[in-house]
Structures are given as C-alpha cells and as structure tokens.
Image (spheres, coloured by chain):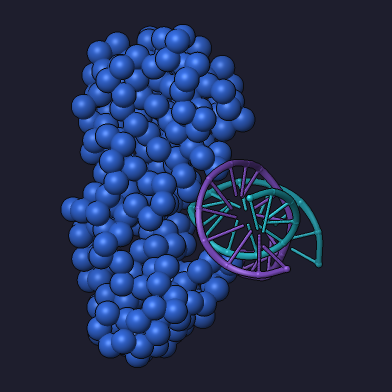
Chain colours: A blue, B purple, C cyan
DNA sequence: CGTAGACCCTGGAAGC
DNA sequence: TGCTTCCAGGGTCTAC
C-alpha cells in the first residue's frame, strides 16, 4: 500500500511529464472523482509542477488548477508511452484501469486501482494550503527536527506509539507498514504509551523514522502485493521488512516469534524480545 | 471533542 | 473441486 516512500517514488518518476499538456481524459469510474466537470477543466492545461503532500500526489496545472490524487490501498499511476486512449487499445485495457490522462508528448498517464478506494480531485491553490495545514509535519520537511518531533508526539501522552506514528494530523505520510517497521528499528514496543518513553527513546524513534523512510525511498518503496512505481515496476523494501506481515515467523535477530496485535482496527507487528 | 465502528471495494487465502 | 467466509486497509463519515 502506498505510503510516503511509495508516493515519493511515484512523484519522482512523474517529474518527466512536467511541462507536458493534458490533451485527453477518460474514466470508467467517475465516483472516484470528487470535482465536478473534472475532464472539462483539465483539458488543454499544462503541467507545471508535481509534488507529494503526505500521501497525496499534487499536480499543479496552469490557471490556478491543482489535481490531487490519493492512491489509498491499491492505486497506481503508471506512465504508458503509448496513447491508450486510442479506441482499440481501450477495449482490451486492464480491468482495473479506471482513469487515463492523455498527454501531448508522453503518451498516457494511467490510473489503475483494484479496490477502487483511490480518489482524484481538482482544487484551487488555496485548498492545497488548507490541506497542508490539516496535515501533520512531513518527515522530510526542514522543520522535522528532534525538538518538533518530541513536541508533536508529546501532545498524545496516553496514546500508543503506533497510532501516533500513523496519525496523519500529527505526522504526515506514515502508514501501517512503516508504523510497525519504525518501532522495530528503534527496538521499542509499538504498543507502549508516549508518556512512558524516555528522552533517549524518543530520540531513537525520531532517528529510526528518518532512517527507515530514507532507506525505503532509496529502495523505491515496498511492494507487498499491488504497489508499483510509475514505470509499473516493484519496489525493493519488501525484502527488508523485519516484522510487518510476519506474525508467527521468527525474528531475524533473536528467533522469537513475531507477534500481531490489532491497534485501532489495524494490524501491528513486533518482536516481544527485541522491542521492549 | 474524542473515539469507536461502519463503510467504501476486490482478490486472494483459508475454511468447509 | 467449488463454495463461503475472512482478511487486507486509508480516510471519511456517523453515532454515541
């Protein structure tokens, strides 16, 4: 599932279409598109800038128009050098290909989504500022310092580490996979309350957050099942997962059986020996 | 205000 | 083999 490293990888891959123009659009699942008359508004618009905002993909167009895409669980944005809007190709398209942006120079930008949770929207620059304000601090923002990280998590003393790391209003971009992997790296039990952490442990969690996310970006994300980058290829971090999805298996470090707990309806994994 | 739970969806795995 | 049930899960919305 696309989290910060996966979305960043896609955004990096998409930089090539900056400066291109949207000349066509097709969709067979309009329910995913929040804006009205989306197609009409984006046709003929030039792509000025593409960036990540939390787990959102932001595509700035001309004329104060901004596309916001969220991949949710199984969304994929894939660049196809061919124009898949051509009628014949469209007929034998993939079952899960739901939206296509036809570009002037770079073929098509295809939006695939198996579970149909992903969304598309068209908003104003002001709305982007509003969304930015509603999101927590991004781990790769210059303001993501140890002091700010400490202040942020300290606001939720009675919450456990895992749910705080995953809370988008506090820290932006961490999802269920990395919210298990980061505490493992820090060797801290994800079920522990924030109030219970020592200053050193908070620092360790801070460093582990940056270390794990940086490594995951370097390896172009985690492909457990459906995630693919904009070239349609898998990432590499799934080979480096230590606890996520490994309940019942042995910890690579100590052979203890990895445990699974449900925290706020989400699976959470940890090694009861390594993570105290 | 905070939070628990339902909901949106499909494919794959597990159970029978 | 083939059917049914369960599970995965980010974000939004509703109910308490």
> Which sits in the foreground, A55 or A228?
A228
Rendering coords of residue A152 (x, y %): 38, 68
Instruction: Confirm whether residue A67 shows in the render.
Output: yes
Rendering coords of residue A243 (x, y %): 36, 73
Residue placed at 27% from the left, 75% from the top?
Answer: A185
Q: Is residue A106 left or right of residue A92?
A: left
Residue placed at 38% from the left, 10% from the top?
Answer: A23
Residue placed at 36% from the left, 24% from the top?
Answer: A109
Instruction: Give residue A200's quadrant in the image.
Output: bottom left
Residue placed at 52% from the left, 77% from the top?
Answer: A261
Instruction: Confirm whether residue A202 shows in the render.
Output: no
- Is A233 above or below relative to A154? above
Rendering coords of residue A49 (x, y %): 27, 28
- Is A7 above or below relative to A202? above
- Is A135 above or below relative to A230? below
Q: Is residue A106 left or right of residue A133?
A: left
> Which sits in the foreground, A231 or A140?
A231
> Which sits in the foreground, A276 or A95?
A95
* Number of numbered discs on residues: 0
- Is A251 above or below relative to A26? below
Rendering coords of residue A190 (x, y %): 41, 78
């Amino acid at each position: 599932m696309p989290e910060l490293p996966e979305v960043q990888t896609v955004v990096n891959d998409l930089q090539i279409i900056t400066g291109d123009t949207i000349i066509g659009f097709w969709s067979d699942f309009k329910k995913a598109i929040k804006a009205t008359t989306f197609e009409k508004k984006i046709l003929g618009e030039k792509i000025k800038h593409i960036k990540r905002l939390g787990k959102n993909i932001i595509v700035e167009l001309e004329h104060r128009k901004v596309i916001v895409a969220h991949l949710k669980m199984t969304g994929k944005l894939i660049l196809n050098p061919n124009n898949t809007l051509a009628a014949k190709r469209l007929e034998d398209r993939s079952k899960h290909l739901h939206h296509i942006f036809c570009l002037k120079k770079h073929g098509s930008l295809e939006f695939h989504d198996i579970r149909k949770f992903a969304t598309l929207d068209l908003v104003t620059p002001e709305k982007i500022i509003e969304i930015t304000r509603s999101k927590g601090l991004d781990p790769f923002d210059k303001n993501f310092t140890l002091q700010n990280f400490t202040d942020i998590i300290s606001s939720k003393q009675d919450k456990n580490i895992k749910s705080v790391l995953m809370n988008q209003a506090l820290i932006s971009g961490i999802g269920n996979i990395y919210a298990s992997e980061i505490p493992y790296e820090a060797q801290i039990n994800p079920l522990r309350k924030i109030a219970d952490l020592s200053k050193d442990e908070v620092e360790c969690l801070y460093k582990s957050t940056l270390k794990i996310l940086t490594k995951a970006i370097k390896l172009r994300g985690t492909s457990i099942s459906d995630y693919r980058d904009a070239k349609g290829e898998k990432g590499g971090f799934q080979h480096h997962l230590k606890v996520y999805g490994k309940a019942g298996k042995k910890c690579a470090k100590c052979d203890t059986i990895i445990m699974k707990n449900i925290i706020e309806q989400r699976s959470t994994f940890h090694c009861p020996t390594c993570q105290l």
